[in-house]
């Protein structure tokens, strides 16, 4: 039974991606008999080429995609380089979970509330410092180049890369390497970039590709922070897909395929860039220069990141409690709970739905991941790079590319808008993150515990339930928290698989963000951020309560 | 004229045929849930839909689930996708809030169930003579396939603390914008209200507005819209953010006005300004006005897709929306403030009193002040204008 777990798991979470890609590919070449396209031709591509906004949209898609990835990686690396030495490490560790748990959409909404010309920053500084009695006519958010998208993404992707980087560094003997570097006269940062980074990067490569793919195809952040005239490719695909005119279904499919090509080319270019950087780096190392670090940028970067994110979330909370808040008042003139009261049930239902969906998807993913890992442990398997790539597939393929086709497949199967479809779709995204988080600790578990138990006569089941699982409670809870946060933050997958019937906090917040009263948007975004945060808090605190008399399992780190 | 008579005759005939069926429809509707799909960017409308849901549940045992959309077209796409996947019954959309190009698309593709209107007892209260948009949506005959439930008319919204004499003609609007750069905003043209801004300007700028009632053709489009583009080329740099970025919707512009970023915009709801002042989302100094030569008005409809799973319940809900109780509740500025589609003068005394008792906010014009209602141009104009605008300004 257990031996089938990896196959079953891969089938469950790769089948929708494969079916979805096919379901997008065929209409992209005008093949979708039910919709009146029975011949294969290039009409959808011609229509796509006719869109006047295409060149500009592609340009900003690539700019935001690469911009967000490069910036996130650099910031993350500078912070990681600083870690071995700093008290920063411990503080950062406690700041990471909230940053990771906050969904992209909530962060984007908060960021917009913060930096818009009429945003909180401008209000805090006006009119005494800026002289603005009225908001300036500046294109700060939704700017034509997508800089706001880049900023919004960096706020979320840096914590993610930090998390992956911290885990990878845990396996490396960084201290000894740096000590060796120091004995040769290299400053710690120079030594870090020349000796630690090359090894670390092999572990960061796939996550970086995932960030690259995500930044190219993001929809919710682009809807909130991006330009609309024209938008990046992601929102434009959604726009076409929602057109009443049938012809646009094909254009949407073609554009989704173009998006896929863009990501594939992007990753190829990035790989080429890696080779170039590595070659340059090697020649630098060979020359053996020993530059002195002048400014340490890590602390200001880390502080800027945490403060921006914190203020963004605070701005959301303030708006949800504002009665009226006119420019340039630094705080609302009137505080009230009217927004919360008037939204009432309108808020409760999405909370319950979001939570139920996240719990189901996370539990399903957890069972599958546990089965796979237990299978590995029992049979002493060591999955290679290939398996890792497979797990990353849903994170590397742009969402738009397979969700468009997947909806058509779901309707065929009469599964659209059902809980099954929704949980399954969420599983596709939850499983990789949950599995990677859990596998990390699971594979590190000392096999001698199990062997000792076996020597004492325990069967495989007893070993699992009496020895392994209790020791794994903390990592399991952490993985559950990650899975919950991923599910709670999904926008496009919820929209497509849910047939629009499932209003989660994320879909509601994004729907409202473009149009509705900022106070209401604030309430939805705040709840959207608070729900996964609460789960994280429980995941962190529960082991301490459960194991109050087991010091080794309490896990304060 | 002849067509109207024929349509009326058809309605009378079918009314007789269906008259028996209503109690049966009500009986079958009991226990069903209506999935009402609609654009959900306006919380007051969402609250009204929730209220209507409570009412029909109490009165008829029909539950209402609002499916909130960013764009009405999402629901149309879903019905299209269901048809293409061969789902001819048990569809996921029971009722769509619809009009304009979306209605035309569904009607043309045979995606609507009906005629429904003659089967609804309350439909006889609807004013089709005095409010022609109730029977003709964007020049497209409704043919009983969509139930009117509220009226909208363009009004311009301005902050009287900053503007004393707002521009009342389209050329004056340009002059004002040039004198006050960055203080005028209209929603993105992909948004209905944004496109309406252009149509409103086109009405006044084009030499012969009558052509707008017929479909746009390749032959006449360029000539008819040339004055519009000349006007807009000058206007755009004077818009908010130099016309490089546009607020997504009318509600987003309202937020800008509340933030003091803009002083003048437009709205499709004559009472929206008053209700917004009351709930603190617009400054108290905001007022509304209409253009000298009138403003565009249209009707919002609800329609039932051909494959809806709960047609009976959808009809019960639609019929309730036409009741004087629901119409007066909606027109109350404390609720949505949407104009009623009913012929209020023809209602019984109790019904008339419901409307007479409604309060009216300081920023709301009277029916007389709202003046002339311009009919919507044929949908092809909007589609082409939107495309042409993208071609010119979106790159």
Image: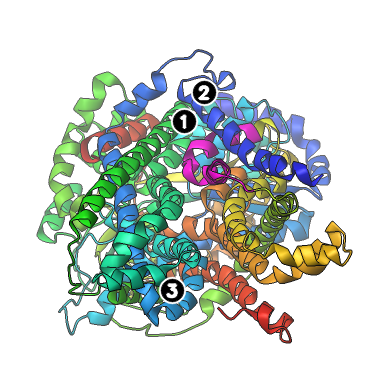
**Sooner in the amino-acid sequence: mark 3 or mark 2:** 2
Mark 1–mark 2 contact, CB under 8 Å? yes
Q: Chain of mark 1?
A: A
Q: Which residue is mark 2?
A: A26
**Sooner in the amino-acid sequence: mark 3 or mark 1:** 1
Give the side of residue A381 with respect to residue A212, left or right.
right
Q: Chain of mark 2?
A: A
Picture coordinates of residue A90, whole percent (x, y): 45, 80
For label 1, the crowd category at 10 Å Cα-Cα, with few meaning under 14, some 14 to 19 and many 20 or more, is many
Residue, far right: A457
Picture coordinates of residue A103, whole percent (x, y): 50, 62
Q: Which residue is drawn at the image coordinates 15% and 79% (left, top)?
A: A131
Picture coordinates of residue A331, whole percent (x, y): 35, 84
**How far apart are the alpha carbons under marks 1 and 2?**
8 Å
Which range of residues does the magenta coloring cover?
Answer: A382-410
- Residue A400 forms part of the magenta stretch: yes
> Looking at the magenta stretch, what is its main secondary structure?
helix
**Sooner in the amino-acid sequence: mark 1 or mark 2:** 2
Tell me if residue B31 comes above or below residue A313 in the rendering.
Answer: above
Q: Which residue is drawn at the image coordinates 23% and 70% (left, top)?
A: A135
Q: Which residue is drawn at the image coordinates 18% and 85% (left, top)?
A: A128
């Amino acid at each position: 039974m257990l031996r089938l777990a990896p196959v079953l798991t891969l089938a469950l979470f790769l089948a929708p991606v494969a079916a979805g890609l096919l379901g997008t590919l065929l209409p992209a070449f005008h093949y979708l008999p039910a919709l009146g396209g029975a011949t294969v031709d290039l009409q959808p591509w011609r229509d796509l080429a006719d869109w006047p906004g295409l060149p500009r949209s592609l340009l900003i898609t690539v700019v935001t995609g690469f911009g967000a990835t490069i910036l996130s990686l650099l910031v993350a690396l500078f912070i990681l380089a600083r870690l071995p030495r700093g008290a920063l490490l411990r503080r950062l560790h406690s700041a990471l979970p909230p940053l990771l748990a906050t969904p992209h959409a909530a962060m984007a909404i908060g960021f917009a509330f913060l930096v818009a010309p009429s945003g909180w920053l401008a209000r805090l500084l006006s009119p005494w410092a800026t002289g603005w009695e009225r908001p300036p006519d500046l294109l700060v958010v939704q700017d034509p180049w997508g800089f706001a998208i880049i900023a919004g993404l960096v706020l979320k992707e840096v914590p993610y890369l930090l998390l992956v980087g911290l885990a990878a560094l845990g396996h490396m003997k960084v201290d000894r390497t740096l000590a060796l570097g120091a004995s040769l006269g290299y400053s710690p940062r120079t030594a870090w970039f020349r000796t630690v980074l090359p090894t670390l990067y092999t572990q960061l490569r796939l996550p970086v590709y995932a960030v690259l793919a995500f930044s190219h195809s993001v929809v919710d952040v682009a809807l909130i922070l991006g330009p609309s005239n024209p938008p990046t490719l992601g929102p434009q695909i959604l726009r076409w897909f929602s057109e009443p005119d049938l012809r646009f279904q094909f254009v949407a499919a073609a554009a989704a395929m173009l998006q896929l090509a863009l990501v594939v080319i992007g990753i190829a270019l990035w790989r080429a860039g890696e080779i170039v950087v590595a070659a340059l780096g090697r020649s630098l190392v060979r020359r053996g220069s020993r530059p002195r670090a002048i400014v340490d940028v890590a602390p200001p970067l880390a502080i800027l990141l945490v403060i921006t994110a914190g203020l963004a979330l605070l701005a959301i909370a303030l708006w949800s409690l504002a009665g009226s808040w006119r420019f340039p008042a630094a705080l609302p003139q009137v505080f009230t709970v009217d927004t919360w009261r008037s939204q009432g049930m309108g808020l409760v239902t999405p909370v319950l739905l979001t939570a139920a969906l996240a719990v189901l998807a996370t539990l399903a993913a957890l069972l599958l991941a546990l089965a796979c890992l237990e299978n590995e442990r029992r049979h002493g398997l060591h999955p290679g790079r290939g398996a890792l790539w497979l797990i990353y597939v849903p994170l590397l393929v742009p969402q738009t590319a397979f969700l468009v086709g997947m909806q058509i497949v779901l309707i065929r199967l009469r599964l659209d808008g059902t809980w099954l479809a929704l949980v399954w779709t969420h599983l596709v995204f939850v499983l990789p993150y949950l599995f990677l988080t859990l596998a990390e600790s699971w594979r590190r578990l000392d096999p001698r515990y199990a062997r000792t138990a076996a020597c004492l006569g325990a069967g495989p089941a007893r070993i699992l339930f009496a020895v392994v699982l209790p020791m794994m409670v903390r990592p399991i809870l952490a993985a559950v928290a990650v899975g919950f946060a991923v599910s709670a933050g999904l926008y496009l997958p919820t929209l497509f698989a849910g047939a629009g019937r499932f209003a989660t906090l994320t879909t509601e917040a994004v729907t409202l963000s473009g149009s509705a009263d900022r106070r209401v948007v604030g309430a939805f975004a705040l709840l959207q951020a608070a729900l996964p945060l609460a789960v994280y808090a429980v995941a962190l605190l529960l082991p301490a309560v459960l194991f109050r008399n087991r010091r080794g399992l309490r896990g304060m780190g | 004229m002849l067509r109207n008579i024929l349509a009326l005759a058809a309605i009378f005939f079918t009314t007789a045929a269906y008259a028996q069926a209503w109690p049966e429809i009500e009986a079958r509707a009991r226990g069903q849930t209506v999935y009402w799909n609609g654009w959900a960017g306006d919380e007051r409308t969402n609250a009204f839909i929730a209220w209507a849901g409570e009412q029909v549940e109490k009165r008829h045992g029909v539950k209402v689930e609002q499916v909130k959309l960013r764009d009405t077209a999402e629901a149309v796409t879903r019905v299209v996708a269901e048809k293409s996947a061969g789902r001819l019954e048990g569809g996921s959309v029971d009722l769509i809030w619809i009009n304009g190009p979306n209605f035309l698309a569904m009607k043309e593709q045979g995606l609507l169930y009906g005629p429904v209107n003659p089967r609804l007892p309350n439909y006889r209260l609807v004013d089709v003579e005095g409010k022609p948009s109730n029977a003709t949506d964007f020049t497209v005959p409704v043919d009983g396939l969509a139930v009117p439930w509220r009226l909208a008319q363009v009004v311009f919204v301005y902050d009287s603390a900053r503007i004393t004499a707002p521009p009342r003609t389209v050329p004056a609007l340009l002059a004002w914008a040039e004198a006050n750069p960055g203080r005028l905003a209209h929603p993105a043209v992909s948004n209905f209200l944004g496109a309406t801004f252009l149509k409103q300007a086109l009405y006044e700028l084009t030499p012969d507005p009558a052509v707008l009632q017929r479909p746009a053709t390749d032959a006449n489009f360029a000539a008819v819209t040339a004055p519009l583009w000349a006007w807009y080329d000058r206007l755009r740099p004077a818009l908010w953010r130099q016309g490089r970025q546009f607020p997504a919707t009318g509600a987003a512009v309202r937020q800008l006005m509340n933030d003091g970023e803009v002083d003048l915009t437009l709205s499709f709801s004559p009472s929206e300004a008053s209700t917004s002042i009351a709930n603190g989302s617009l400054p108290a100094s905001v007022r509304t006005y209409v253009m000298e030569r009138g403003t565009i008005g249209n009707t919002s409809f609800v329609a039932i897709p051909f494959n809806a799973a709960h047609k009976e319940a959808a009809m019960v809900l639609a019929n309730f929306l036409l009741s004087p109780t629901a119409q007066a509740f909606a027109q109350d500025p404390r609720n949505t403030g949407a104009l009623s589609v009913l012929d209020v003068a023809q209602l019984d005394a109790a019904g008339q009193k419901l409307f007479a008792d409604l309060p009216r906010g300081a920023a709301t014009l009277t029916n007389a002040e709202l003046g002339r209602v311009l009919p919507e141009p044929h949908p092809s104009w909007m589609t082409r204008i939107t495309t042409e605008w993208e071609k010119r300004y979106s790159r």
